[in-house]
Amino acid sequence: MHKQVDVNDHGEPLDRWCWPHSEAMNGAEIKLFLGRVNALQRYTDNAESVADQLMRRDRDPFDDRKICLACKNLNGDYCKQRYASKAKNFQPVKTVLWRCDYFKQKG
């Protein structure tokens, strides 16, 4: 079965000049970006900037940073794992990309 490819008026694939061929976001990245912006707006005034950082992170195979909002250990305003490890005064910055040994993907 062939995958249907969206094309422009000239019959060229819409994502032809997009990532990974250039820095322009492709259709899948745009859809994910808009979903992230929508979800992040509850937590930060710069949701577009955070969503852009996440998109750039997704493109880099060596970037293993995460955000607390995507972690199972985030419980309201505290991290269950850090709280259990006696770091009771640790307050996660939910929308900042960083590396964390306690990260567990929600899902």
Image: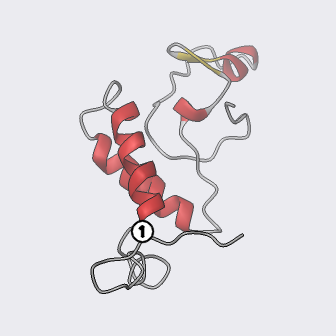
Is 15 drawn above or below residue 103 in the view shown?
below
Determine whether, in the image, residue 4 is placed left or right of residue 27: right
Query: Callout 1, which amino acid?
Result: Asn
**Residue 99 percent location from the top left of the image:** 62, 47
Quarter-wise, where is residue 63 in the image? bottom right
Which colour assignment does the render follow?
Answer: secondary structure
Label 1 Cα neighbours within 10 Å, binned few <14 / some 14-19 / many ≥20: some
Q: Dividing the image into 4 quarters, which one contains the C terminus?
A: top right
Residue at left offset 72%, top offset 22%: 81
Which residue does the numbered mark 1 point to in the structure image? 26
- Residue closer to the observer: 7 or 32: 7
In the picture, residue 24 is in which quadrant?
A: bottom left
Report the quarter where the N terminus lies. Answer: bottom right
Residue 9 in the image: state x and y as whole percent: 27, 80
- Count all numbered tags in the image, as a single digit: 1
Left or right of residue 86, residue 7 in this image: left
Q: Secondary structure at mark 1?
A: loop
The residue under the point 67% across, 15% down is 83
Along the line of sight, the residue nearer the viewer: 61 or 77: 61
State whether residue 101 is above or below residue 5: above
The x and y percentages for residue 56 are 46, 63
Q: Name the residue nearer the viewer: 56 or 88.
A: 56
Q: Residue at x 53, y 30 (%)?
A: 69
Name which quarter of the figure residue 46 lies in.
top left
Residue 2 in the image: state x and y as whole percent.
66, 73
| Apparent side of residue 8 relative to residue 33 in the rendered image (left or right) | left
Q: Is residue 44 left or right of residue 58?
A: left
In the image, residue 88 above or below residue 5: above
